[in-house]
């Protein structure tokens, strides 16, 4: 079977972009890290998330992804994802409270917000999300895709991840540029940033719980 590659790549890039741009915990954390530590701290998180997605996509393309769609697996992974969001929420809330009280920045702040830590966190967020498996089953595991052959499936995966990474590049750069034009915000800017992120993580936790219980 001869497959036109340009439509495959184009649709994959558009799919990756469209899935990556809606507000969510990853985009929220990218913005916070760009504000706290600069471009690479935020962009590294989306690179880590893309790496985690690449693993899920490979498992789905090889026919192993269905093992993670059962109720037990979904509940387990959903619990891990919610637990991770809860840890992030508590971390940011503690930072906000400490800043409000006029305390010094926590000693683990630079390490937690570093590019390396961002990459690991992004990969962990992607790997523990049960909805990522569902997405990749729809993207490359749907009926008809297997008939295109493994090379086309892998090309689709690369295109989708490239689209998501492109969004992460644009989002990270936009946040950094806007931050430089508006200004640092000082101590209270950090308090609002961490406190607001904590509240958003709480919202994402509630949303995740509702999805799992539906």
Image (cartoon, rainbow, N blue to C red):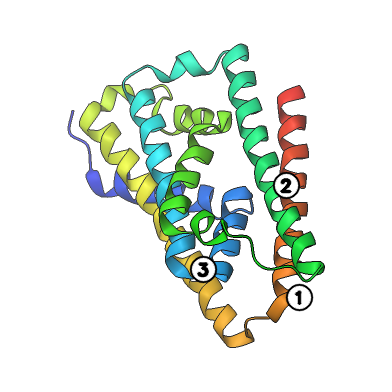
On residue 66, which mark appears? Answer: none
Residue depicted at x 55% and y 83% = 180
- x and y percent of residue 192 in the render? 76, 68
The residue furthest left is 2
Residue beneath disc 1: 188
The answer to which of 95 and 85 lies nearer the viewer is 95
Earlier in the chain: of badge 3 and badge 2, it is 3
Q: Secondary structure at mark 3?
A: helix
The 10 Å Cα crowd at callout 2, few under 14, some 14 to 19, many 20 or more, is some
Q: Secondary structure at mark 2?
A: helix
Relative to 125, is 2 on the left or the right? Answer: left
Residue beneath disc 3: 37
Residue depicted at x 73% and y 39% = 205
Q: Secondary structure at mark 1?
A: helix
Q: How many marks?
A: 3
Relative to 1, is 56 on the left or the right? Answer: right
Residue beneath disc 2: 90
The quadrant of the picture occupied by the N terminus is top left
- Report, in whole angstroms, how far the alpha carbon at label 3 lies from the one at label 1: 17 Å
């Amino acid at each position: 079977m001869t497959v036109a590659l340009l439509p495959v790549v184009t649709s994959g890039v558009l799919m990756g972009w469209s899935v990556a741009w809606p507000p969510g915990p990853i985009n929220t954390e990218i913005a916070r890290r760009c504000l706290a530590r600069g471009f690479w701290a935020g962009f590294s998180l989306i690179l880590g998330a893309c790496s985690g997605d690449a693993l899920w996509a490979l498992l789905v393309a090889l026919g192993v992804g269905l093992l993670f769609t059962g109720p037990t697996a979904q509940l387990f992974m959903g619990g891990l994802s919610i637990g991770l969001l809860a840890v992030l929420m508590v971390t940011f809330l503690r930072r906000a409270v400490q800043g409000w009280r006029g305390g010094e920045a926590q000693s683990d702040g630079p390490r937690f917000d570093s590019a390396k830590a961002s990459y690991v966190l992004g990969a962990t967020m992607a790997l523990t999300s049960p909805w990522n498996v569902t997405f990749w089953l729809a993207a490359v595991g749907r009926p008809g895709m297997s008939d295109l052959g493994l090379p086309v499936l892998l090309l689709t995966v690369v295109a989708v991840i490239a689209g998501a990474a492109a969004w992460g590049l644009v989002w990270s750069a936009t946040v950094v540029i806007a931050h430089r034009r508006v200004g640092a915000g000082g101590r209270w800017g950090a308090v609002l940033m961490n406190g607001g992120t904590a509240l958003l993580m709480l919202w994402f936790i509630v949303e995740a719980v509702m999805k799992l219980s539906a």
